[in-house]
Image (spheres, rainbow, N blue to C red):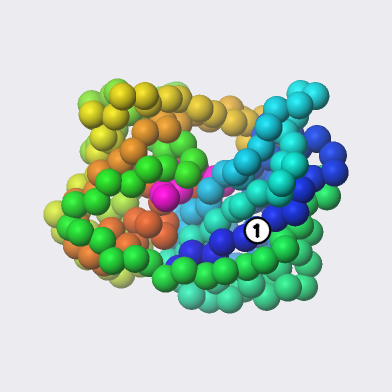
C-alpha cells in the first residue's frame, strides 16, 4: 500500500542531504518497532519539485512524498502519526494524505525509479557499490528482492530483476546519510514475476537501503 503526502513549502533552505531527515520523520510517526530491522519491507521516494538556491533546496510550490509499505500496520501507524504531528523540517509539513492500493501489473513490468537504486556487497574487507552498467547488478537486485519476499512469507520462485539496458540516459546519484556517502543508479528497472511478487516490489523497493530512501519505484 502506498501513502502519498502533499507537503507545504519550506521556509528555510533544505539540505541536499535531507534523506536522513525524511527517515527521522518516518520513524517519529511509526515509533519504535520492527520496522527498524536490517531488512526493510518498505520504501520511500525523494522529494519532488525542489530548486537549488543558496546552497540548498527550496520547494516554492510545496512538494510530494510517497511511502510504500508491505505491512498494513505500518500504514496505519504512519497515518496516525501524521495526524498527531504533521511537521517535517524547515517549515515543511503534511497538508494532505491519500492512499493507493498496489495496481495490477503484467508479469513483466518496467518501472521508473523515484530514488536511486543502491546496490552494495562486501568484498573481503571493503564495501563495493554496483551500478546499472555492472553485469552483477541484476543478480544482486534479484537476490535482495528474494530475501525480502521470503521474509514476508511469499514465494521467491523465478522472480528476476534487471536494469533497462535500452534506457538512453542512466545516471548515478548519491547522498550522504549521517556522513556516509552512498550512490545509486537512476535507471528504469524491469521485473519479471508473478502479480504478487511485482506488487510486493512496488511496495518495498529494490536494492539495498530502501529504509533510508533508496530504490523506490514509480
Answer left or right for 167 relative to 192.
right
Name the residue nearer the viewer: 89 or 57.
Answer: 57
Look at the image and tell me in which quarter the N terminus lies: bottom left
* Residue 79 lies in quadrant: bottom right
Residue 74 visible in the current orientation? no
Question: Where does residue 93 sit, x and y in percent of width and height?
Answer: 76, 57
Q: Residue at x 42, y 38 (%)?
A: 117
Judged from this view, the residue extending furthest toward the left is 158
Give residue 213's position: percent from left, percent from top: 54, 45
User: Which residues are drawn in magenta?
Assistant: 211-218
Relative to 69, does residue 89 appear above or below in the rendering?
A: above
Seen in the picture, residue 149 relative to 124 is either above or below; the reply is: below
Q: What secondary structure characterizes most of the magenta part? A: loop
In front of the other: 185 or 7: 7
Residue at horizontal 33 percent and vertical 28 percent from the top? 132
Residue 54 picture location, percent across and down: 80, 24
Residue under label 1, please give it: 6
Quadrant housing residue 178: top right
Determine the residue positioned at 30% across, 41% down.
Answer: 189
Residue 116 located left or right of residue 108: right
- Where residue 76 sits, quadrant-wise, is bottom right
Task: Give how far across and how far down residue 200 sits, in percent.
Answer: 34, 62
Q: Is residue 90 left or right of residue 39?
A: right
Residue at 79% x, 45% y is 10
Q: Secondary structure at mark 1?
A: strand
Q: How many marks?
A: 1
Depicted 193 relative to depicted 171: above or below: below
- Asked whether residue 172 appears in the rendered view, the answer is yes
Mark 1 neighbour class, 10 Å CA radius: few under 14, some 14 to 19, many 20 or more: some
Judge whether residue 125 is colored magenta: no
Amino acid at each position: 500500500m502506498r501513502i502519498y503526502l502533499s507537503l507545504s513549502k519550506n521556509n528555510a533552505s533544505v539540505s541536499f542531504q535531507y534523506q536522513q531527515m525524511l527517515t527521522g520523520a518516518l520513524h517519529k510517526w511509526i515509533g519504535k518497532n520492527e520496522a527498524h530491522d536490517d531488512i526493510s519491507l518498505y520504501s520511500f521516494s525523494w522529494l519532488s519539485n525542489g530548486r537549488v538556491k543558496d546552497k540548498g533546496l527550496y520547494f516554492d510550490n510545496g512538494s510530494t512524498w510517497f511511502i510504500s509499505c508491505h505491512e498494513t500496520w505500518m500504514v496505519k501507524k504512519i497515518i496516525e502519526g501524521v495526524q498527531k504531528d504533521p511537521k517535517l523540517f524547515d517549515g515543511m509539513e503534511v497538508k494532505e494524505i491519500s492512499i493507493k492500493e498496489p495496481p495490477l501489473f503484467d508479469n513483466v513490468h518496467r518501472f521508473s525509479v523515484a530514488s536511486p537504486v543502491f546496490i552494495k556487497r562486501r568484498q573481503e574487507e571493503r564495501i563495493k557499490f554496483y551500478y546499472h552498467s555492472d553485469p552483477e547488478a541484476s543478480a544482486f537486485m534479484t537476490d535482495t528482492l528474494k530475501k525480502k519476499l521470503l521474509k514476508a512469507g511469499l514465494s521467491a520462485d523465478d522472480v528476476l530483476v534487471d536494469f533497462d539496458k535500452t534506457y538512453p540516459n542512466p545516471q548515478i546519484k548519491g547522498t550522504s546519510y549521517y556522513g556516509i556517502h552512498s550512490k545509486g543508479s537512476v535507471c528504469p528497472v524491469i521485473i519479471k514475476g508473478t502479480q504478487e511478487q511485482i506488487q510486493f516490489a512496488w511496495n518495498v523497493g529494490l536494492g539495498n537501503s530502501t529504509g533510508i530512501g533508496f530504490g523506490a519505484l514509480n
